[in-house]
Image (cartoon, grey):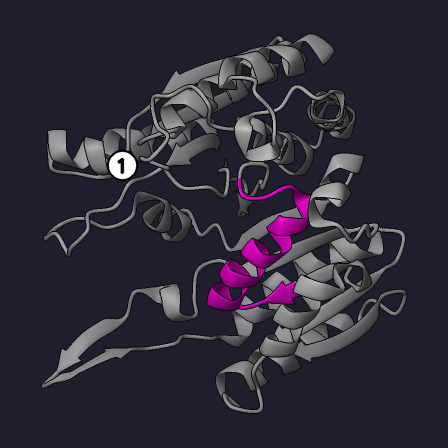
């Protein structure tokens, strides 16, 4: 049975790296059926919608999507809202998975302090300060932070299910309950309650500022991190340094019967069109989709080995100290599949 994928390149370097990821996916999954769709700032400028209904219909029909990047207007534009945030909420993609691994020697050399980093950050993806509840009240701009028990419990289950299958079987709850006792207190307590049903998994917790420091200095201590939306967004970028930077960082937005993979980097207008964008983040994001949505671990393993083998061989884009083009890196990865 064919695997159906909606491909949305978006803006900037998304137009360059997403076709590379599709090429690699097609090499690994010959039965892959591609449906193309449009979204992003350029789409908004052309059509008046950053996320057309036709695109939503195509994502719904496929069940899986690969999304590139979006540029954002410098100032508030009436009617424009980030399409990826819209899709996360529209499809209830409540879990954002962001792994960070050092699987090649060069990454350790770049950082200068080799550590066996292998962690995954599990981020609640629909609530917190990203719930979109902002308003003006006189001269005050107010944003509401939304945390519910139900959302906290279901993201906890994702984290503990992942942890129970990993070697170290440890979950770290990251919060700021000392300052935000109602919202973060509810999150922490709900996660701990779910964790009680996983006796094989060790649970600890850490304040977010401490977690940021430890991710920057001693990331090897972490296994699975579970946290709220904004904290997860920031901490996963800190962790990405240990995996080679934003050009290599993958992510997957996962819900019930629906998933959207997206590289963590943005549209990078400063390098767009130059052919030097790193396609590895997009390709590794596609591998996450293969692993967690289509449940094809062996295929995901092949893609990941090809990516890290290519980096190890010295075929790298400039952000990793190499001289290869986007297409050259992608071609080498595809060759290794």
Quarter of the figure that contains the C terminus: top right
Q: Judge whether 149 appears above or below 258 on screen.
A: below
Image position, residue 89 (x, y; %): 38, 53
Q: Looking at the image, which is closer to me, 54 or 290?
A: 290
Q: Looking at the image, which is closer to me, 306 or 318?
A: 318
| Residue identifier under label 1 | 40
Q: Magenta part mainly helix, strand or loop?
A: helix
Q: Judge whether 185 appears above or below 89 on screen.
A: below
Quarter of the figure that contains the N terminus: top right
Residue 141 placement, left or right of 207? left
Total label count? Answer: 1
Image position, residue 59 (x, y; %): 39, 31
* Quarter residue 321 falls in: top right
Image position, residue 136 (x, y; %): 15, 78
Q: Judge whether 160 appears above or below 285 on screen.
A: below
Residue 171 appears in the rendering: yes
Disc 1 is placed on an element classified as: loop
Residue 108 placement, left or right of 70? right
Residue 8 appears in the rendering: no
- Identify the residue at horizontal 61%, vertical 49% (top origin): 240
Q: Looking at the image, which is closer to me, 138 or 146?
A: 138
Q: Which residues are magenta?
A: 226-246
């Amino acid at each position: 049975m064919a695997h159906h994928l909606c491909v949305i390149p978006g803006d900037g370097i998304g137009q360059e790296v997403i076709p590379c990821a599709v090429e690699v996916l097609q090499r690994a999954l010959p039965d892959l059926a591609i449906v193309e769709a449009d979204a992003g700032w350029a789409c908004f400028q052309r059509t008046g919608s950053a996320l057309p209904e036709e695109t939503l219909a195509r994502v719904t029909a496929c069940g899986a999507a690969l999304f590139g990047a979006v540029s954002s207007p410098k100032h508030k534009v009436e009617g424009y809202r980030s399409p990826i945030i819209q899709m996360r909420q529209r499809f209830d993609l409540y879990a954002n998975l962001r792994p960070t691994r050092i699987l090649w020697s060069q990454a350790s050399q770049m950082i200068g302090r080799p550590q066996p980093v292998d962690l995954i950050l599990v981020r609640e993806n629909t609530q917190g300060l990203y719930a979109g509840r902002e308003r003006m009240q006189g001269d005050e701009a107010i944003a509401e932070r939304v945390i519910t028990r139900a959302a906290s419990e279901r993201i906890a289950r994702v984290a503990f299910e992942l942890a129970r299958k990993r070697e170290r079987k440890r979950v770290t709850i990251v919060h700021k309950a000392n300052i935000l006792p109602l919202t973060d207190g509810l999150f922490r307590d709900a996660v701990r309650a779910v964790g009680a049903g996983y006796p094989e998994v060790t649970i600890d917790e850490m304040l977010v500022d401490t977690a940021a420091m430890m991710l920057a200095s001693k990331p090897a201590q972490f296994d699975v991190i579970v946290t709220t939306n904004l904290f997860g967004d920031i901490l996963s970028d800190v962790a990405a340094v240990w995996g080679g930077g934003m050009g290599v960082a993958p992510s997957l937005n996962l819900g019930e019967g629906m998933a959207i993979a997206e590289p963590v980097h943005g549209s990078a207008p400063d390098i767009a069109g130059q052919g030097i964008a790193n396609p590895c983040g997009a390709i590794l994001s596609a591998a996450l989709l293969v692993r967690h949505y289509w449940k094809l671990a062996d295929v995901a393993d092949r893609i990941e080995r090809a990516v890290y083998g290519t980096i190890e061989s010295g075929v790298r884009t400039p952000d990793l100290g190499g001289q290869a083009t986007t297409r050259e890196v992608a071609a080498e990865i595809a060759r290794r599949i």
